[in-house]
Structures are given as structure tokens and as C-alpha cells.
Amino acid sequence: MNTHPDIRTEHDRKLAQTLKSLSFEPAPHNAKPRNRPIRRLIFPGCLSALALAAIGGIVVSQTETTRTIQTTVSALSNPSDSISSTKEVGAHQDAESEERNTPRNPTPAARELSGSGFVVAPRVTTVFSKYEGRITKIPVDTGDRVEKNQVLAILEDAGARFALDQAKAGKTAAELVLAARTIDLSQARASLHRTQTLAARDATSDQTLEEARTLADRNLNALAQARHDLARADLAIRIAEEPVAELTVRAPFAGTVTRLDAHVGDTVLARVDSVREGQSLMTITDTASMVIDADVAETRIAFLRPGLRGEAILDGFPDQPFTVTILRLAPVITAEKGTVAMRLSITAPPSGIRPNMAARIRIPLVEQTKSIGGNTQ
């Protein structure tokens, strides 16, 4: 096809090239088909994906913007609802914070005092022999109940017995002397009476009368001395009887024999030496008036007062609780342990209660309130 050279333009030239490329001329036999580059296929796909993502972002952004504008317009049109919503959110947040800070199971304040102590017998005595002697009889044994002045042991001391016999003999002699002095005085008074009768008749001299009076006075003094000697003999007997009586050891009060250290045939020392050597006969405990001693922390002392009642249980009798009452609190605090000693009386304890038994106590606490003037209500 021929084209006039005058009318060829740039546009016509491009068109001619395009038509030429669309011609159906047979390809050369030795020509190999050309593979279209893969990148020409991937590049348009990537461009399409980017275009779609941009369009989606624009749509989402427009949606969020529209929602924000609507919320703002609603808040401006109805400010009271906005403020109420804000308050509800704040209150909800405060409630959640308080719930997190508050323990779920708060520990209730202690309203009673729980502790432990021991059974104590305030009246306990260690029995000694006042004088030295040999034990000849012990009529009691450990665990026996004894009454006041009941015989606990009998000792023998020959020297004490001899001293008593001697004192009794001295009393007998004093009684004989007293009798003789009584007779002498009676005779002296009779003689004085006869002499006075004769002197009244001028039948005797004044010297004889004076001698009769002197004799009577002398016999009177001798009688008084004899009476004094008899009193001394009585005192000597009482002195001699005291060691002999102390050879019979008796219970100082009613109680129970909780320890027995002596045996028949033993020779015991006098009390002064026995105490120094630690040699006792036995121990008597008044088990009818026992108490409980316990230690409590000094931080609880403000809640305690004498007369406060509680309950105690012995480890040996866990199913037999009984009532206890605070008798007194110690006037000082134990510096080493930071505790105060407390003594409690016992009401109707188990029949088998014994000293040194462990006890558990529970006492309801009473908080003391103070008035303005400082007086306890």
C-alpha cells in the first residue's frame, strides 16, 4: 500500500506501525517463540491489589470519621446524656478499683482470748521434822488424803524422852519442897500467934515476939520460893514435852500426800539442817483450792480485768469444760517474754484434776472505753 508523502503525519506513522504489527505474515521457520516476561503479568496484579487496598482504607477511614462526627454531634445536641454516661463510666471504674483493693475474706476482730496455762496448787508445803530422830512409823503413802493434824510420821529420840522424864522428876521435887515450906509456914504462924498472946499478958519479952515474927516471914518467903520452883518445873516439863511431841509429825492442813521421801528406819536431821541439806519427809498439797496460772501478751491487757469469766478445758479431760474467773493480774510485765501473768480461779473442775496439768482457756474480751475525764466506763 502506497501512501502519499505529503499527508503522512506522526499520527499516521504510528497507525501504520500498528497495522503492520497486526499483519499475518508467516514467521520464519527458524524463529523461536518468545516467552512473555513473568514480570509483565505480576506487575499489573500488584497494581490492582494496591488499588483495592487503598479504596478499602478510604472507605474504612470515611466510616470511622462518620462515626466520630455522629458521636460528637450527639454529645453536643444532648450534653446531659454525655455527662451521665461519663459519670457512670467513672463510678464503674471506682467500684472495680475498690473491689480489687478490698480483701474478699476480711479477718474479723478477735473477741476472745485463747491461751494455755497450768493447774497450780497455791497451798503446798514440804514437811520436815523439827528435831532429829529416827523414823519408826509412817502411816500414810503417796496419794493419800489427809486431814489437818493427822499423823504423818512418828520418830524416836531417846534424849528427848530422857529430858522429859528429868523435867517431870524436877517437878515432883519442887512439889515436895513446896509442901515442906507450907508446913513450916503454918508452924511459924502458930508460934507467932502464941507469942503474941503471951506478950499481951506480959508473959514474954518483946524480943521473943520479934523473933517469932521474923520466923514466920522467913517461912512465908520460903513458901513463895517453893511455888516459884514448882512453876519452873512445870515450864521445864513443857519444854521437854515439845521435842517429844514434835517426834510425831502431823499434817499442817488438809490435803493430799503428793510426794514421800522418808522411809521407816531412816534417821532425819533437825529442820534447820534438813532444809540446808534438802532432806524432807514428804509434801502435802491442798488439791481442793487449785487455780490456773497463764501468761498473756501485754497487748491484750487493756481488755482484761479481775472478775472476767471464761472457760477452761484440761488436756486430760477434753470433754469436761468448766468455768474460770480472773482473780488478779500480775503488777509487772515479764520483760523477757513481753507477757503478764494471770491467775484464774476454778469452778466445778473435773474430779480428777491434778497440779501441773495443762489447760486451755477461752475468755471473752471486754474492750474498756474511757470517758473524757479518764474514768473507765
Image (cartoon, grey):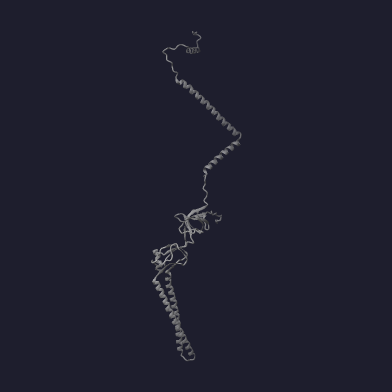
In the depicted view, which residue is nearer to us: 176 or 1? 176
Q: Is residue 95 left or right of residue 336?
A: right
The image quarter containing residue 73 is: top right
In the depicted view, which residue is nearer to us: 159 or 326? 159
Q: Is residue 165 visible?
A: yes
338 up-or-down from 235: above or below: above
Q: Give the tally of numbered discs.
A: 0
Q: How far across and how far down the image is residue 9, in percent?
A: 50, 11
Q: How far across and how far down the image is residue 124, in percent?
A: 45, 62
Q: Is residue 130 visible?
A: no
In the depicted view, which residue is nearer to us: 228 or 83? 228
Q: Residue at x 54, y 27 (%)?
A: 59
Q: How far across and how far down the image is residue 85, in percent?
A: 58, 37
Q: How far across and how far down the image is residue 266, in percent?
A: 38, 66
In the depicted view, which residue is nearer to us: 321 or 87? 321
Quadrant occupied by the C terminus: bottom right
Q: Is residue 113 left or right of residue 269?
A: right
Q: Residue at x 42, y 71 (%)?
A: 244
325 up-or-down from 271: above or below: above
27 up-or-down from 130: above or below: above
